[in-house]
Image (tube, rainbow, N blue to C red):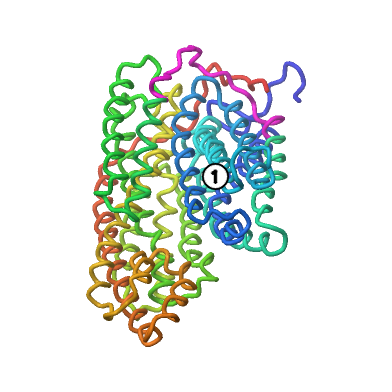
Amino acid sequence: MSVEGAQPKYVTSGILRLTRPQLIGTMLGMLLTALLAAIDQTIVGTAEPRIIASLSGFDRYPWVATLYLLTSTVAVPIFASLSDRFGRKPLFMGGVMLFVLASALCGASGNLTFLPFDGMGQLIAFRGLQGIGAGMITGVLFAIVGDIFSPQERGKYQGIFAAVWGLSAIFGPTLGGWLTDHWSWRACFYVNLPVGVIAITALYFEFPNMKPRRSGTQIDWNGFALLIATVVPLLLALTWVPQYGWSALRVWPLLVLSAVMLIGFLANEARAPEPIIPLTLFSHPVIAVCSLCSFVLGVGMFGAIIYLPLFMQGVLGTSATQSGNLLTPLLMGAVAGAIVGGQTVSRTGEYKLLGIIGSLFLAAGMMLFSRMTGDTTTGYVAMAMVVAGLGMGLLQPVYTIAVQNVAPRERMGAATSSTIFFRSIGSTVGVAAFGSVMLTRYHDEFLRLAPAGVPAEAMTYLTNPILLVQSRPQLAAIFMKTPGGLAMVQPVIASVKTALLHGLQEVFFVGAVVMVFAVVPHVFLKREPLRTREVTPESAAAPSH
């Protein structure tokens, strides 16, 4: 506390100015919160076999990830918009508390016998709840950074948060495996509790509660409903595309429904007094271009890169037990790029050039992936990953900084969430589209190359290469009981490998084409000078807790 009447010594120049103790406490809470949200996406994967063995419900396990994706994606724009109205602190802390509570419930799944559904059903429901908390955290976090720091200061801090995300993705699988082996799969969820409590405590005592400018009470309930009705069927349909195809009865009607709801959502947002995603934001060329770039980045980058572990396991024969570390070079490159990119923006104020260089690196990395063959060394793959990762990292701070630099103060949350939202939708579109490309080519190649007489029972597993690693025991049992089955194993493996290689080569080639085209909008990204200080009457004095 400062002496009464004396001006506190602030160390940030944003709309919300903080003293050094406030900055340290706030950054500690935010970084721990970012760590929670980021590591949760990777730590659970290595515990999957134990979870399935403990709770059964193998056929329902994909919903553990699907429902988390649905709820977190929808929550981002909704709660970011609400934070513009009701303030950042209550919603951000609410998101952290919900995330921690849901983590405890996930860890207790199967033991809550008073609930009307079984253990796997409990885990799926609680992961959906956890996704809402994660969406609240993600949607509000970068808006808070925009409040605290002036545009010129933001780069290095955005880079730090992006680095936390990357490092979490690297260490998450290893931590998940260690906790599962030495404690229990439940520990992968319980580990969030002490970290979350520290984050909540730091935020409660040190993060000021700035009163929002927008004090109106009218909430766009129709917009909330229409956004959910647009996103949920879209993500469900795209999740099912790789397995069932675009023409499946469970896919195309959902896409049609999503398109109809989107029209209704846009019509509602155009006339709503307080829209969730104000369409007027996209009349600004910087916000429009950044949203487009985020979407294309999601399509080309995440849509193709997610298939890298499949290439290394299915084509190069890398051990599946090491799958948690397969993307380490990519993520290390992303961490380095995020830190360098953030510092560069803060020192030079130049985000456009960084966006162009980052997109060129990413396009180069994707072109290197497209040249991989069955004889490619793991060293070549690692080098290509580092190049692509550097591009990813350099681009991480660009969109948020550029958008926050031009967004109206009262729409900071909605504007910031737009780039996160479009990237999330783009990545889901990319995974579905590239999955469809890969499976179509794989099916054609495998049916042409497979030896005659492969048991029909085995074909069920062989037609979906994504599940081959998990279905090896079943395939071995089928070929063992089939007359002449053992003689078929090697030709079948060779056919799978060749078909998978050609399918993945097509995926990486299309991804490279998309990322080359993605360089173009970065060239047209308008460069606005970064404001060095944002002082308003509301920020002239330290806000109260």
Q: Position of residue 105 (x, y in %)?
A: 65, 41
Position of 237 compared to 544: left or right?
left
Please name the amino acid that badge 1 sits on: Ile
Dominant secondary structure, magenta: loop
- Residue visible at 53% across and 51% down? 41
Which picture quadrant has residue 391? Answer: bottom left
Q: Is residue 399 magenta?
A: no
Total number of numbered discs in the rendering: 1
Q: Position of residue 114 (x, y in %)?
A: 68, 37
Q: Is residue 218 magenta?
A: yes
- Residue visible at 25% across and 65% down? 441
Residue 302 vs residue 116, the one in the foreground: 116
Position of 135 compared to 519: left or right?
right
User: Helix or strand or loop: what does disc 1 sit on?
Assistant: helix
Q: Does residue 335 lie above or below 220 as drawn?
A: below
Q: Which residues are magenta?
A: 203-224
Neighbor class of circle 1 (other Cα within 10 Å; few <14, some 14-19, many 20+) is many
- Residue visible at 42% across and 59% down? 390
Quadrant containing the C terminus in the rendered view: top right
Q: Position of residue 464 (x, y in %)?
A: 36, 64
Q: Position of residue 509 (x, y in %)?
A: 26, 63
Quadrant containing the N terminus in the rendered view: top right
Residue 538 vs residue 53, the one in the foreground: 53
Quickly name the residue at label 1: 124
Q: Does residue 235 lie above or below 41 as drawn?
A: above
Residue 424 vs residue 285, the one in the foreground: 424
